[in-house]
Every structure is written in C-alpha cells, then in structure tokens.
Amino acid sequence: MTTSIQDVPIAPRRVPVLGHTLSLGRDPLGFLQSLRSRGDVVAFYLGTRPVCQVNSPDLIRRVLVTDAHRFSRGAVFAKARQLLGDGLATADEPSHMRQRRVMQPAFHADRVAGYVEVMREEIAEVVAGWRPGRPVQVDREMARLTLMVTTKALFRAELGQAAVAEVRRSLSPVLNGITKRSMLPGELLERVPTPCNRRFEAALHRLTTVVDGVVDAYRASGADHGDLLSMLVTARDVEPDADGAAGPAAPAMSDAEVRTQVMNILMAGTETTATALSWVFHELARHPEAERRVHEEVDTVLAGRPVTTSDLARLPYVDRVLTEAIRLHTPVWLLMRRAVEEVRLGDVTIRPGTELLISLPTLHRDPDLFPDPMRFDPDRWLAPEAKDWGRARFIPFGAGGHKCIGDGFAWAELTTAVATVCARWRLVPVPGRQVREVARAFLRPNALPMIPEPRIR
C-alpha cells in the first residue's frame, strides 16, 4: 500500500534520511506541542515515513469515533500486536469487538464496585510499610500498588511473590521498548544486537514465561475463581445472528490467546494508573491549598473509617483533582491510527497507509481549549461548559469503540488510592530534587522521591 500525503503542512527542520527523528527523540512533547500552532493536520517524518499529527478536536473525534471505520490501529499497536499478540488492547476490527464482548462483563459497574475492597486492602498494605520521615520512591510504590491491585482484583488466585516480582521487573522495559520501536524509521535497527535490544528481548521472554505459568496453573486447577482469568480460560464467544439471537458458541481460547489477553491487561491496566497517581501526589505536594481541601473532604466523608464503594461518589473535590492532574500529565501521550482508505480531514487529503498521531497531552495543554493550561486548577472543572469537554477536547482514555474498557476500574482505583493515602499521610517533596516529565511508554516522572509525614486529624 503506497503511503503519501497531499496538501499537508510539513514540520520545519526536516533532515535528509532521518526526517524529524532526532527532534522527536530529543524532546518528544516539546516537538509535538510545537506542531499544534501549524495547522489542524501537520506532517512530520520518521526517516522517510510520513506521520500526520491531528490537532483539531473535531478532526480527532472523526478519526476516533465517527469515521473510525476508515482507520486501523496504527504503528504503536501494530508493534505491540507483533510482539504481544492480537489482544483487546491491540486488535483491529472485527477481532477487537469480539474480544471486547467476551471481556466486558469483568468491567461492569457492579463488578468494579466489588473490586473496591480488594483495592483498599492492597493500597493499605503498601502504605503500611512507610515510615515517618523516611523517603519513598512514590513512582515505584505506585507501580507496585497498581500491579498488586490488578493481579488481586482481576486474577484472584495467588500468583506467588516470585511471579509478581518478575512482572514488576519486566513490564516497564517491554512497554518502553514497544513504544521506542514503533517510532524508529524502520525495523532494521530492531535486529541489531545492541544492549538495549538484548535487554528488551530478555524482558519480553521473562514476562511471557511468567504469564504462561499463570495460565497453565489456572488450566490445571480447573477451578473458577470468579475472576477475569477464569473467564478467559473458559470463554466462549457467541455471535448474534441476523435476527439478533445468539448463534453457536466459538471454541475456547487457546493458551496463546489467553496469554495475549493477560499481557494486554497488564500492559493497559497497571503503569497508566501508577503514572497518574504519581502525578496526583506530585501536584498535591506543590499546591498546599488543594492538598488541604483533599484532606478536609476525605476526613469529612470517611470520618476515620476505610473508604467504601459508596464513598467514591461523595468525594467530588478528589474527583476534580484527579481529572486536573490527568489533564496536565496525561499518561498515554500518543495514540496512532493508520488510514485504510483515502480520507479528507479538513483541508488535507490523507492517503491509504498514512500514519496518524494524536498527542493527548498536547491536546489537553492547548491554550485555545484550556485557558492557562499549565496551571493546576481543579476548579476549572466547575465551569458550566466543562460537562462537554469530554466529547473531544479531554479524552485521556481515548474515545469511540476502542476507548479503554477499564476506565471505570481505573477511576475507582485512583479515587480509592487517593482517599486511603490522604486519610493517613502527607507526601512531601524531597528538598533539592527536580521532577521532570519523561516520555517513554507513558508520560511519567523521571523519579519521585517523597517523604511521608503522618497526618494528625
């Protein structure tokens, strides 16, 4: 399929052969942010391969929602599919919709409500190890926390400490490697036996081996633990016929297919939430008035008891703090799609095969959409027009048929974590440490050492 673009503005400072690869590598967010002022659709080059960044909220909605059938998932997802398999987070249609139908019950609101107790217990276990005045690496603690929550809530059987530790060790290198490889000009560099490539291959092998062991253990036990993995092991997809009646059930998933889904859930459900929580505690520490209001609300609603499912809707200021921190530091820093047919987007023509990029943090920091966008202001979400922002200008979980299936689970986990931590602790920055954004698989802090101080209500 020939890839070409027509009538699309080109980013400046294109280098022969390399295109804009060096500019993107040096400062990904700065480079992508600079393209927003150059048009609704702007092209840059990874080597000789053009990529079109879509900046207009209306055009983004067309790509993700109204004209989604004209696009496949794009380079990042294609690379993840190549390495992890054709799972829910990576699949194109019609495979994606079949898989979503099988897995949707695990993320129903009633199921999510049942997970809150598990979330609270795991979060409490993590923070119980903190000591007053002794610094903790909050970004690492949040990664440990979200992995524990995911494995306990969605995979109820005991995985064993060694398995969980191996997933913690290997998951980040795999995710970072997938993102990096998808942005390379070609696949030749992936095959060069550099130390970076060898580390990636070793981490992928370790992660795959651990997940295969977990799937084998579930198969051997024959027990239904009432969790997502049990559901996957026994799943049968039922296609509706032309009259809407249930058709014949498909065969059960193979071990390879179950492994793919587990890898996809781990990929999508742990580091994104951990990154978001890290930024929340970073922003609360930088804004004492917001921190005071969170503590006041948590103390009033919980009155010293553990958070419950019914409490989550009674924490509106916590909800706004989460929303604002995720707007300012959106963990998923890029979405990609690939045109499967010729599409006219605004004033430009996109040819089949062209890669499209949607940069969520730069969208969420656009001053034309969010006044004074770099200011942390949870109360901006009280504006009457804010209820409409989720249509196109604020889409941290994506939009359309490929919107994150676990957004409700993630939000319950975020709220539970903030309420549980803030009921007991303040997290104070370590003096002299500068926190900066790093764009790897997700937009995370480079490091976040903080000092826990007990709260006295």
Image (cartoon, grey):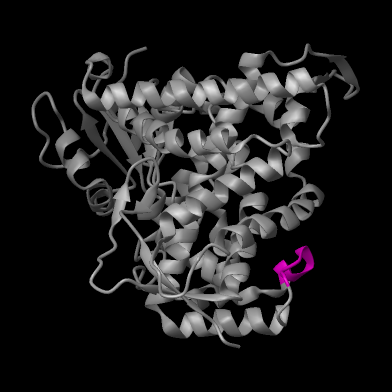
In the drawing, does residue 178 fall left or right of residue 102?
A: left
Quarter-of-image position of residue 350: top left
| x then y, percent, for residue 244 | 88, 25
Query: In the picture provided, is 412 more to the left or to the right than 168?
Result: right
Residue 340 seen in this snapshot: no
Name the side, left or right, on which 92 lies relative to 237. Answer: left
Image quadrant in which you'd find residue 363 = bottom left
Magenta run includes residue 308? yes
Q: Give the residue drawn at x 57%, y 55%.
A: 391
**In the rendered image of this protein, does residue 391 appear above or below residue 425?**
above
- What residue do we see at 46% from left, 75% from top? 132
- Location of residue 316 with respect to 224 vertically, above or below: below
Looking at the image, is 12 positioned above or below residue 312?
above
* Residue sitting at x 72%, y 74%: 314
The residue positioned 78% from the left and 29% from the top of the image is 231
- Asked whether 351 or 44 is in front, the reply is 44
Depth order, front residue of 321/449? 449
Q: Nearer the viewer, residue 339 or 142?
A: 142
Instruction: Pinpoint residue 361: horizontal percent, then vertical percent.
Output: 38, 54
Total marks placed: 0
Q: Is residue 243 visible?
A: yes
> Residue 359: x and y, percent?
38, 46
The percent position of residue 138, horizontal first and vertical second, equals: 43, 60
The N terminus sits in image quarter = top left
Question: Magenta stretch: residue 445 in it?
Answer: no
Residue lying at the far bottom in this picture: please name it.
Answer: 457
Q: Is residue 64 above or below residue 216?
A: below
Q: Most prominent secondary structure in the magenta stretch?
A: helix
Give the magenta range.
Answer: 306-313
Q: Quadrant of residue 445?
A: bottom left
Q: Quadrant of the C terminus?
A: bottom right
